Amino acid sequence: MVKVVEITEFGDPSVLKINQKDLQKLQPNEVLVENKSIGLNFIDTYHRTGLYPIPLPSGIGLEAAGVVKEVGPDVKLFKAGDHVSHASMPIGAYSELQIMPEAKLVKVPKSINFEEASAITLKGMTCEYLLHRAYKAKKGEVLLFHAAAGGVGQLFCQWAKALGCTVIGTVGSDEKIQIAKKNGCDHVINYSAQDFAAEVLKITNGKGADVIYDGVGEKTFEKSLEAIKLRGMFISFGNASGPVKTIDLKKHLAPKAIFFTRPSVMPYTATREELELSAGRVFEAMESKKIKIDIFKKYSLDEARKSHEDLESRKLLGPAVLIP
Ligand SMILES: NC(=O)c1ccc[n+]([C@@H]2O[C@H](COP(=O)([O-])OP(=O)(O)OC[C@H]3O[C@@H](n4cnc5c(N)ncnc54)[C@H](OP(=O)(O)O)[C@@H]3O)[C@@H](O)[C@H]2O)c1
C-alpha cells in the first residue's frame, strides 16, 4: 500500500485527505518512482479549489524528485536507481510512490539533491521559459516581477539578475523586502503599502518597465498596465490573488500597444526536446551557481493541509517541499 494525498471534492485545505492505495500495474512505457521530495506549488491550490477543474477523485501535486524503482519493458531513457524529477501531469505527486510516463521524466544530475530538484523542476522551468522563450530578456532591460519573495520569485530574480537585467520586485510585507533583495532584486516595492505603479515609474524616470511578470493576477493586473512601458511585454502567468477575469483589448492593450501572453509550463515543455532543453538549462543554472535554492520549509505528507494553509495565507518566505 502507498500513502497518497487525494481529494474527492473541491474546497479549502480540509478536502486534502491522506489515503492508502494499491499501485496500478506498470504499463510498458511507464516508470515507477519512489518520491523522495515533492514540490509545493500554488497550482496545487488551483487544482484543490477547482479553479483549474480536474476529474475527481484525484491525487494532487505536479512536481517531485526521486529514485527509479522499476521500468516498463519499452522504457529506454531510464533504469532502476536513476535520480529523476518531473513537473507534469498526471497529477499525483503527493505520494510515496508514483507511476509516471517515461516521456515526462528528466534525469537529475547527482550534484543536485532531491529536495533541491523537487523545488526547481517546475519553478525553474517556469523561470526558464519566462526569461528565455516567452520573452528573451536582455541585459539592461527593466523587469517587474510580482511576489518576488515567493517560490518562483526567488529563482526568477536570481536568474534575471545573472542575465544582467534590472529587476524590480514587489512583495506583500516588509519582512519580505530583504528576501527579495537577497535574491537579486535591484528595487523592492511593498505593494501592500505603496502604489507600485507610481514607484516603478519613479525608478524608470517615467518610462515604465520593459516587461511585467505577473503571477498575482486579479489584484495587480490593472495597476501593472500603468507600470508598463509603451509597447511593453505583459506576461500573465498565475492567479495567486484570483484570476484576471476579462482582457479588454481596447481598454487594456490598445492604449500602449502592449504585447500580452498567458503562458504555462505545459505548452513550453510540450515535446521531449523542449522538456530536455528547459530542464537542462535549469540544472545548468544550478550547477554554475547562477541560481541557488534555499528550501524555506519542509512538511511531511501528513501535513499537506497545513502546507496549503501556509502557502495561501502568504506565510511562506520561500520554496517549500513535502517529504514522504
Ligand atoms: N504559468 C506557469 O507556468 C506557472 C508555473 C509556476 C507558477 N506559476 C504561478 O506563479 C505564481 C507563484 O507560484 P509559487 O508556487 O511560487 O507561489 P508563491 O510565489 O510562493 O506564493 C504566491 C505569492 O503570491 C503573493 N500573493 C499576492 N496576493 C495573494 C493572495 N491574495 N493570496 C495568496 N498569495 C498572494 C504572495 O506573496 P506576497 O505576500 O509577497 O504578495 C504569495 O507568497 C502563482 O500564481 C503560480 O500559479 C505559474
Image: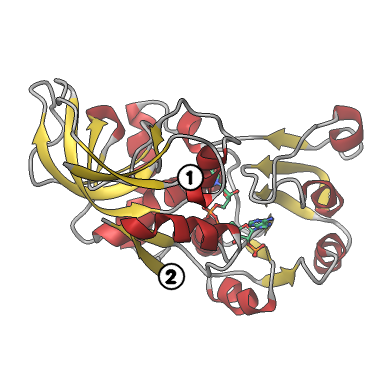
Q: Amino acid at mark 1?
A: Val
Q: Quadrant of the N terminus?
A: top left
Give the percent coordinates (x, y) of residue 45. 53, 46
* Horizontal side of residue 118 vs 144, given as left or right: left
Q: Is residue 176 above or below residue 78?
A: below
Give the percent coordinates (x, y) of residue 201. 85, 62
Quadrant of the image where one finds ligand 1: bottom right
Camera-nearest residue between 40 and 188: 40
Residue at (82% x, 49% y) in the render: 229
Q: Is mark 1 within 8 Å of ligand 1?
A: no
* Horizontal side of residue 87 vs 164, given as left or right: left
Q: Nearer the viewer, mark 1 or mark 2?
A: 1
Mark 2 is surrounded, within 10 Å at the Cα level, by few (under 14), some (14 to 19) or many (20 or more) other residues, namely: few
Q: Which mark is residue 296?
A: 2
Q: Quadrant of the C terminus?
A: bottom left
* Horizontal side of residue 196 vs 239, given as left or right: right
* Horizontal side of residue 267 vs 177, given as left or right: left
Camera-nearest residue between 100 and 299: 299
| Mark 1 or mark 2, earlier in chain | 1
Give the percent coordinates (x, y) of residue 290. 42, 63
